[in-house]
Image: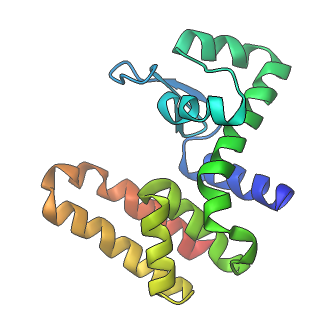
Amino acid sequence: MGNQFDLLMDQIITDQEGGWKLSKDADGGDGGWTYGGMTAKTFNSYCDHLDFEPVVDYEQAAELIEDEQERQNFKSDVLAVYHEEFVAPLNLPIVADEMRGPLLSCAINCGEHFALFLFHDCAGNRNFFLEQWVLHYQRIVLHNPDKEQFLKGWKNRVAYWFSH
């Protein structure tokens, strides 16, 4: 899927994950950084498997993105983790074009297993998939009102796919 995957991931990262920027998470116990929507914990959990060097703290990540070549290498490594974690398990090449973006975005935000369950339950019907995805978020808030602070952002994620 190569280039198609890169374009789709860049679209999701740019439009839904805050872009290709490095953020510091002072409260996080996972190394304290997020880059391209990926936390240090997720990235570093794949380092051994994908033969990458771990990026253990925010300062190290900040140094990597100062140099253009290092930034491109880091971005490629992050994309490789997204591919390993989401694209490969979802088997996106066999999914209809109009479902790839919503399915991948749902998997990134809700987990691969839920996204696949919803996809199969909706029999590939894009609008039904998106409607059920919103209902999933509403059920989360119904069962855990503390999560209501995230509901608007979650709904915006789904609304994006109604228009793209």
Foreground of the two, 88 or 78 = 88
Check the image and report above or below for 15 versus 47.
below
Give the quadrant of residue 132: bottom left
Foreground of the two, 154 or 97 = 97
Q: Residue at x 67, y 10 (%)?
A: 63
Query: Residue 49, image x and y in percent?
Result: 65, 36
Query: Residue 115, image x and y in percent?
Result: 48, 69
Total numbered labels placed on residues in the image: 0
Query: Residue 62, image x and y in percent?
Result: 62, 14
Q: Is residue 54 left or right of residue 79?
A: left
Q: Residue at x 64, y 47 (%)?
A: 82
Q: Is residue 134 left or right of residue 72?
A: left
Q: Is residue 54 left or right of residue 158?
A: right
Q: Residue at x 15, y 56 (%)?
A: 144
Q: Residue at x 48, y 30 (%)?
A: 41
- Quarter occupied by the N terminus: bottom right
- Quarter occupied by the C terminus: bottom right
Give the quadrant of residue 37: top right
